[in-house]
Each structure stands twice: as structure tokens, then as C-alpha cells.
Image (tube, rainbow, N blue to C red):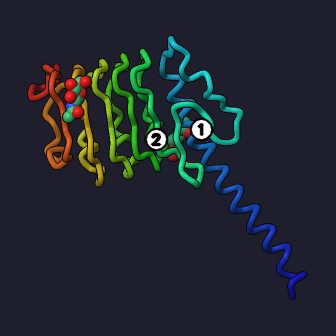
Amino acid sequence: MEAVLVPFVFVFIALILQAGEVKSNAEEEALTSLRNSLADPNNVLASWDPTLVTPCTWFHITCNSDNRVVRLSLYENKIEGTIPADIGNLTKLMALDLRANSISGTIPPSLGQNLQSLTFLGLEDNRLTGQVPHELGNIPNLKFLNISNNNLCGFLPIELLRVPTLDWSNNPGIGKVCP
Ligand SMILES: *[C@@H]1O[C@H](CO)[C@@H](O)[C@H](O)[C@H]1NC(C)=O
Ligand SMILES: *[C@@H]1O[C@H](CO)[C@@H](O)[C@H](O)[C@H]1NC(C)=O
């Protein structure tokens, strides 16, 4: 009986390991896509080595016990460039901290669409433009959203008003139609 079960157990374990690996590789690809769309004059992303099995040992990344990325923190690092839609593939992310850099471009809608575990989103003190995507209003447990000191425009999605800590100050275009 046991001798019959053993091969099945091995196959099962192999499948679990493979599933785990596929997931962390997808997150590694999403982070590599982010890195490729950023300029990093201070080389703070130098440890982001895509040949490692998971991104969990990279600096500025925190994972949970399942090796899924839950925190990405690049506060005040003189980073330029844009946020790619692939950031939405970090589906377990709880905190995204890009505060105080020189990031430009728009806020990708995928951020609100796919990052349903986000509680902290710090985008203040950058050079973001365009409309605040209404998808951000769909993140169920968002507790902190600061988009202050950017060049965002348009009307703030009404759903955002339930976010306990919300700061959109110093965006001269907010409340006006985008040019
Ligand atoms: C992110 O997910 C989308 C949808 O599954 C996929 O098309 C895209 O290739 C992924 N991006 C990366 C960088 O893996
Ligand atoms: C949002 O960011 C701005 C700019 O750094 C800061 O002055 C403000 O205190 C922040 N707001 C909140 C609610 O933390």
C-alpha cells in the first residue's frame, strides 16, 4: 500500500514546488519590468538580480512566508521613469512606497484593478501626470493614499473619499478637466 502511494506523493510535492516557482517568477518578471522602466542614478536597484529563484532577497522588497512580494519600498531614491502596468502582477502587494522620487507618467489602472491587498500607496512628491484612475477606488482595504505634490489632473474618483488617510494636495490640475 505505502509503496504504491510514495510515487504519487513525490509527484504531488513536485507539482506544489513548480506552482510556487511559477508564481515567484511571475513576480520577478513584473519587478524586472519595473526596473527596466525606471532610471536609477543611485543604483539602489543593483541587487535586483533576475537569475535568483525569487526576488525575496532583493533590497527594497519584502516577501511573506510563501515568498510572495508584499512590500516594495523605494522611498526617496532619486528614481526617474514610469510605472509599468506590469506592477499589477504583484497581486499580494500590501504596501507600495514610491514616495519622494522623480517618477513621471501616469498611474496605471492595473494598480487598482489587480492589487486588491494594498493598504498603503505612497506616490507623493513625484512628477506623475494624467487622471487618477477610478480603479484605485476599488481597492477594498486601502488605508493610506498620498498623491500630493504631483501634476495629476481631472476629478478625483468619488470612491476614494472613503480612504481613511487621503492627501491629494498640491496637484494644480485636480478638480479641473485634464488638458
Ligand atoms: C503580467 O500579467 C499579464 C496578464 O497575465 C501578462 O500578459 C504580462 O506578460 C505579465 N507581465 C510580466 C512582466 O510578466
Ligand atoms: C502627503 O505628502 C505630503 C508631501 O510630502 C506631506 O506634506 C503630507 O503631510 C502627506 N500627507 C499625509 C496625510 O501624510
- The one of 6 and 106 positioned closer to us in this rendering: 6
- Indicate the secondary structure of the residue bearing disc 1: helix
Residue at image coords 27%, 22%: 129
Instruction: Rate crowding at label 2 as few (under 14), some (14 to 19) or many (20 or more) other CA atoms within 10 Å.
Output: many
Location of mark 1 (residue): 28
Q: Residue furthest bottom?
A: 1
For marks 1 and 2, give the CA distance: 13 Å
Q: Amino acid at mark 1?
A: Glu
Look at discs 1 and 2 and give the one toward the viewer.
2
Under mark 2, the amino acid is Arg
Residue 16, compared with residue 153, is above or below; it is: below
Q: Quadrant of residue 144?
A: top left
Residue 178 lies left or right of residue 58; in this view the side is: left
Which residue is more in the foreground, 115 or 154?
115
Asked whether the beta carbons under mark 1 and mark 2 sit within 8 Å of each other, the answer is no
Q: Position of residue 52 (x, y in %)?
A: 70, 36
**Of label 1 and label 2, which has the lower sequence position?**
1
